[in-house]
Image (cartoon, helix red, strand yellow):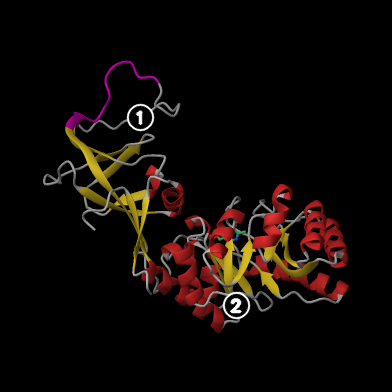
Amino acid sequence: MKNICSPYLEINLSAIYHNAKLIVDIGKSFGIFIDGVTKVSLGDPYIGRILIKAGVRGLSDSRIESIKRMKESGLDTEFTLIRLPCISQVEEEIKYADISLNSELETLKRLNEVGAKLKKKHKIIIMVEMGDIREGIWKKEELDLVIKEALKMKNLEVYGIGTNFTCFGGVIPTEEKYVDFLEIVDKIIKKYKITFSLVSAGNSSSLPLLFEGKIPKGINHLRVGEGIMLGKETAYRKTIHGARTDTFRLVGEILEIKEKPSIPWGIIGEDAFGHKPSFKAKGVRRRALMNFGRQDIDPEGITPEIEGIEVLGATSDYTLLDLGENEDLKVGDSIGFALNYSALLQAFTSPFVKKIYKEVDL
Ligand SMILES: *Cc1c(COP(=O)(O)O)cnc(C)c1O
């Protein structure tokens, strides 16, 4: 790994496979299908491929471009668009996604029209708002109307009903929330005498309930990203028992090492991002500048692998470190970092961060 040009993101495919299989298998034991959510990786085909190998029901992504990328790489599974479809992109959505999550009648009408033109029956999951106040239908009359109209649309299949938690409002799924959700689902099933193939009720924040066997009967599907990618549930941000956390590491290079005061001097205005910076007085410190910045990571979301190093912050192209007692580090050396989900998302999105795969032929 020594000669790889940095910064780079090291992707440990066997660790990701391990986490996916762990979650898929526990799901299976409770009758719950797991979709692997690839959105943090922009639909990385290597990751998609090992998720399929680990037994996911299908792959879910928030961007149609990422689904297209996986499909064109030859991945053969059912693809779900988990962001609401864009009316301006409906053709691609129908062409590349088998299923999409929906909450707007106007969008469904368009999907139905274009489905007729493309001669493809598109599956939909109707999203219900349960308190996280992001996507989904909250008003009962509207939900009823959307289901009623969707059932009449010849080129759509009402394939599932779903809800989402812990994304915008921070609302944690509980058994009570699920009972409320299932009550809504049950009414629709009885009224329209239909069944839903998928009752898709959450993401990695539902993993604590899944592992305790407490997801009520009637729910049969979860869409899991972070739990697989980082080995963490997102309700309490704990490591999942038995999961691996060595899935990704970012490696960057030291561009400057200097002893400098920990506080700037002169008249202090704003930093490069319009914030008034604040500093702790720590005297003269040994500091390093790394070859990546806010364009590549979230400075709050990276943790140095070397003990005693502190991340001071980042500008667009530099990340600043306090090296502490690490006297032996020199210019040109590499330092590795663990990433949280937000930093990982940025590292994948940055064209400047190379992606290096471990154990590609898994
Ligand atoms: C991102 C997302 C997921 C996956 O969330 P994780 O917390 O990463 O498991 C599931 N469903 C929807 C609708 C999403 O947007």
Q: Which residue shows up at 59% across the image and 76% down it?
A: 33
Residue 85 seen in the figure: yes
Q: Is residue 277 above or below residue 10?
A: above
Q: Which residue is disc 1 drawn over?
A: 278
Describe the element under mark 1 as helix, strand or loop: loop
Task: State left or right for residue 280 relative to residue 172.
Answer: left
Rendering quadrant holding ligand 1: bottom right
Which amino acid does the dot numbered 2 rest on?
A: Ile
The residue nearer to you, when weighing 88 against 184, is 88
Local packing at callout 1 (Cα closer than 10 Å; few below 14, some 14-19, many 20+) is few
Which mark, residue 32?
Answer: 2
Q: Which residue shows up at 28% across the image and 32% down it?
A: 280
Chief secondary structure of the magenta portion? loop
Which amino acid does the dot numbered 1 rest on?
A: Ser
Q: Which residue shows up at 44% across the image and 52% down it?
A: 348
Stretch of the chain drawn in magenta: 259-269
The residue nearer to you, when weighing 306 against 293, is 293
Q: Quadrant of residue 266?
A: top left
Q: Work out whether mark 2 precedes mark 1 in sequence or the reverse, and give the earlier one.
A: 2
Which mark, residue 79?
Answer: none
Percent x, y of residue 159: 74, 71
Cβ of mark 1 under 8 A from ligand 1: no
Percent x, y of residue 272: 40, 27
